[in-house]
Image (cartoon, coloured by chain):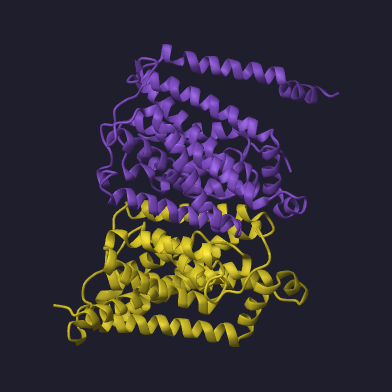
Amino acid sequence: MFTFWEIVLQQFINGLVLGSFYALVALGYSMVYGIIKLLNFAHGDIYMAGAFTCLSVYSLISGYMPGWLGISLAMLAAILASAILGYIAQRVAYRPLLSAPRLSLLISAIGVSLVIYNAVMVMTNSKAMFFPGGINKSTGISYGHVTITYMQISLLAAAFAAMAALTVFISRTKLGKAMRAIAIDTDACYLMGINVNAVISFTFMLGSGLAAVAGGMYCVYYGNVQYSMGYLVGIKAFTSSVIGGIGSIPGAMLGGLLLGLLEAFGTQMLGSSWKDVFAFSLLILILAFKPNGLLGKPEVARM
Amino acid sequence: MKLRDRISSWLESKFIQAAASAALLAFMALLPLFTDNYYQNIVWNAFFYMLLALGLNIIVGYCGLCDLGYASKFAIGAYTTGILIKTYHWNFWATLPVSIIISIVSSVIIGLPTLKLRSDYLAIVTLGFAEIVRITARNLKITGAATGLIAIPRPTFFGIRLVKITHWYYVFLILVVIYIIISFRIRNSRFGRALAYIREDEDAAEAMGVNTSLYKLYAYVLGAVLGGVTGSFYAVKMTSISPGSFDFNQSVNVLLAVILGGMGKVPGVVLGAAFFALFPEFFRDIPVIGDMRMLFFGLLLIAVIIAKPQGLWPERNK
């Protein structure tokens, strides 16, 4: 039998892994929102497309090389594919509407989401795809009944490495500085000679790439992907970025991990059929009582 | 006056519009005399979508708020009526006020905290709320879990038991007419003008003394009530409801009907709803097109919103 503390520890590990998926997807949401104030509704579907690319590429090449190399290459391919997809979406559907009312931009994002979702649905015949075998998922370090698998450790390491790299990039590089500047005042950036459109495109590619990392991790961890997987993760990633304070990069990471942990413990207490209700009720409560999130700055502008 | 202007002003004259509406209504009222149950049911389905679209139009079209979970509004009405009839053996007509009250309460709970914030937060919150409603309906015993409620008894109306498809054709036709009248009455009222102001420029509306969060809440609650009533009628017409009837796709279909039809323009919304209800009927037998339907709608949505941000048949040109 599990003791109380063993359950707590095990759920903590599970929640951390789940939360790192949410955090990676939430980062893309938060960055895009920070820059052009768009709730990129298609972000969950870009994550799904990344997962599919990762799985397809890995299935193609896994026979010719060791597993870890195959996964790394597949992950790179997924990042590339999602970044391109994010760029196309931004270029075709969002850029013409940057000066239009905000509702138009949101509707356009719903359109992009419908296109990606249904394109993948038609391409895969509405069937789930499975990850080919050959990866050891069960061995790990055990302490009593609590187990953390080597796969969980490497996924967490990859997620934290990606988040650390992003933090350094945003705070130390010129491009990162330009992103922060656009978030504060877009018009001034035009006047200061910043290529605003290029930076916006780059932000979309970066966010989509991070979503693809999460998508690739998901398909390695759970072993299957299907066209509808982006929808729920999309809303939960949004919830994460609201918990952390939308527009805030560290907030998105914190919010994602927190939501993952809350969901793991919520599932333990209430049963898995209620876990989504738990996450969405949390979203409504946070918007009611702390709409700026944990790390967000209060916003004066309306609309 | 040029001939073209003359024709267009003639078309816009009140008399012609009234005559055309009367002719259309007479045609719809006489249609069941010439068609069988199959076609009546298809047209009934179009009526049903019109009711949903007219309700959502108050939120999206009149007020410019984005509601991505409209299915939850009509799910609330449908389940309220279904449970009261099945479990507590109420009369159908007595369940309508309850369904309205529950719609009001639930939309105030969702709308009050969210509508004070940026409008686009509402999109995700309504989406989340729709999932909460659907999952709750799937997990509770009183809502019949995943199978839903089945064999809901049909109501009577002045001694006639509404069992035939023709009955429901007329009930929903009357509802469509009522909803259209409500929509026009709202649009031409002080309240409707305030909503249009909020939609066009929220800051300016607020500066002119319109209590924007209050009016947005009114619009949201009103849309939810119309959706709830539609749901109540849907429950007794279908006699069975299940969580699957209220998923995200349903919300998206109604939203597409409102946006593509023309955001606020009542005839446009009605036409949009008819299009979305009838389109699958035409393309059902063609396998590839049937599957790619939503893909095509997604592309259409992006194209329309870029080329004509006010919808295909807008209320007013820019």
As displayed, is residue A71 above or below residue A91?
below
Residue A49 visible, this angle: no
Quadrant of the rendered structure where residue B239 is?
top left
As displayed, is residue A126 above or below residue A217?
above
Residue B267 visible, this angle: yes
As displayed, is residue A127 above or below residue A84?
above
Quadrant of the rendered structure where residue B79 is?
top left
Q: Nearer the viewer, residue A182 or B299?
A: A182
Q: Residue A214, percent across and down?
A: 40, 72
**Rendered shade, chain B:** purple
What residue is at 48 percent from the left and 13 percent from the top? B30
Quadrant of the rendered structure where residue A20 is?
bottom left
Query: Looking at the figure, which quarter contains the N terminus of chain A?
Result: bottom left
A247 with respect to B239 (left or right) = right
Q: Residue B156, percent across and down?
A: 35, 20
Q: Nearer the viewer, residue A180 or B4?
A: A180
Q: Nearer the viewer, residue B38 or B146?
A: B146
As displayed, is residue A11 above or below residue B214?
below
A48 with respect to A298 (left or right) = left
Query: Looking at the figure, which quarter contains the C terminus of chain A?
Result: bottom right
B239 with respect to B119 (left or right) = left
Q: Residue A143, percent across and down?
A: 20, 88
Q: Residue B78, percent across and down?
A: 38, 38
Q: Which chain is yellow?
A: A
